[in-house]
Structures are given as structure tokens and as C-alpha cells.
Amino acid sequence: MTEPLLLAIDVRPGRIVLATVHRHRVIDTRRLEREGCDDAARTAAGIALLRERAPGPIVGLAGVWRPEARLGLADPRGFIALLEDVGARTALPTSWLPHGAALALGEWSRSQVEGPLAALALDVGVAGGVVLDGRAFAPLRLDLGHVSVDPDGLKCACGGRGCLHTYASETAMQLLARDVESSLELPSPADRQQVMGSHLAARQAEKVRSTHVLIARAGRAMGLAAGHLAEAFGVVEVRVRGRHPDQWRVLSATAAKVAADVYGERAPRLVAAESSEDAFFVGAVAAHS
């Protein structure tokens, strides 16, 4: 293979992941633990190793930015400084995308979708992006985790209300589950032996009920957000990636029903993302110029 290759770099809280990308396929990776030392020097050394192993010349470096804060318009300057430092050490031209936009572009690059596509990543926070005419749309000004699905809904850390993040992120669901759990009453010590069996049964039933409530809330929020994207950008398909394999499966039926009930024929298709984390690398590389 003599065709030029591109590198992608995904900087995460505990590690840096490098990937060599050929067209729409990751062909090599290297993971670097962040141990408080010079990240730029360690990354440059990792890139040197990937260059040695690469079957062709590497001509550019594309970054995936994951904001530390789960707020809209988080500051990317620290990430940009790291990327520029690595670029200077390796003599590679650099570019970057937020990870939600990179996911959307990576999914679009591997799809046969005709028309605008959106992608959502359900993680500690909710991130996402929209692809219009083959390009990630306004990546710094469009934080899909903070699309409001209920103007009178839960207060979000960004200052708004009813943001998708407050219903469908792992953090939100854990907080809601904790609130439900703390509201359950335990039997008194004197009555423990007599009521333990019935209490445990009731407690288990309440856990099941609360789980269904959380799924319904999150699914409804996802369906409304998908409809908003269809109205605003003409999105015809929304691809959803959960950090856990079953995460989207349990939300999908509710989300699809809500989108269809509220938006009718305008509702976009809601499907599971096809790609693994490779989509972030592929998307970042696809945007490299």
C-alpha cells in the first residue's frame, strides 16, 4: 500500500488513543496511558512507532476533542495547544473535531444515507453532531446534548431546562435512580423479621417500576430530540451509540414511538450506530483538509 494515510488522535481523561486510518477503515492503533508527564512527547513517540509500522506515508493528524465539562461551548484551547505541539514535533498538519461531530461524520462516511444524518453518543454526557452535504455542521455551536426537549423540564448545569443531557445521559439516569432508591423506606429493626420477605418483594417491584420510568423518560427525550433535528436540519436518520451494548436497545422502542406520535411522517429513522469507537477516528480523518 503506497496510498497516503492519516492519523487520528482521541484524547480522553485517562489515556490517549492513536489510530492509523486508511479511507474509512482503522488499520492500526496505539493506546498511551496519561501518567502526568509530557503528553505531547509521549504522543509524538507513539506516532513515530505507528509511522514505522504503516504500509504507506502518513500525511496528516486529525484530533477528536472530548470536552472535560459537559456544557455547551466548552473551551478547547488546551486540546488545541496539545495538538499543535504534537504537530510541530511530528511535522504533520493538524485539524480537529468535537467527538460528537466526529461520530456523526464517521457514521455518515460508512453509510448509504441520502440526506442529512445526525448521531448521538449516550455516555456520561450526551454528545452528537449533524452532517449536511457531507460536512459536519457548526461543530462548536451545536451541542446536541443541550437540545431542549422540555422548556419547563429539569434544570441543566448549562443554565437551560429540559436538555437531552438531563434525561438520557448515564449521569442523569444514575442520579434519578439514586433519588428513587433513597425514597424507599426500610423496615424498622423490630419489624424486620416479620416484614423482610414482603418488603424485599415490594422493594424489588419498586426498582423494576422505577427502571421503566427512567427508560420512558429517556426514550421520550430521545424521540423529541430526533424530531427537533428533523425539523431544524431536515435530518432523515439519527444514529445512536450507547456506551453499553443494550443501552440503546432498551430505549429505542419508546424513542421511535414518541418521534412518530409527535412528528408523524417528518420523524427521522432512529437506528443503532453501526460503528464501534472507530467511527470517531474515521470522522475526524474525513474532515481533515
Image (tube, helix red, strand yellow):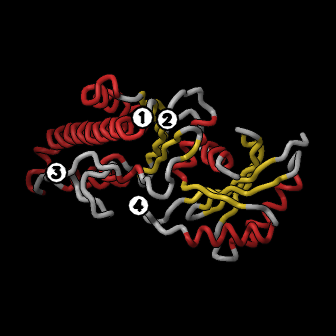
Residue shown at 31% from the left, 63% from the top: 157
- Which dot, 4 or 2, sits closer to the camera? 2
Q: Amino acid at mark 2?
A: Pro
- Gap between marks 1 and 3 measured at Cα: 44 Å
Mark 4 or 1 closer to N-term?
4
The residue at which mark 3 appears reads as: 184
Residue shown at 57% from the left, 59% from the top: 65
Classify residue 103 as left or right of residue 220.
right
Q: Amino acid at mark 3?
A: Leu
Density class for disc 2 (Cα within 10 Å; few <14, some 14-19, many ≥20) is many
Mark 2 or 1 closer to N-term?
2
- Gap between marks 3 and 4 measured at Cα: 35 Å
Element on which disc 1 rests: loop
Element on which disc 3 rests: loop
Classify residue 48 as left or right of residue 81.
right
Q: Position of residue 220 (x, y in %)?
A: 28, 37
Q: Amino acid at mark 4?
A: Gly
The residue at which mark 1 appears reads as: 234
Q: Position of residue 218 (x, y in %)?
A: 31, 41
Q: Amino acid at mark 1?
A: Gly
Which sits in the foreground, 185 or 11?
A: 11
Badge number at residue 116: 2
Which sits in the foreground, 11 or 92?
A: 92
Residue shown at 54% from the left, 53% from the top: 99
- Which dot, 2 or 3, sits closer to the camera? 2
- Which dot, 1 or 3, sits closer to the camera? 1
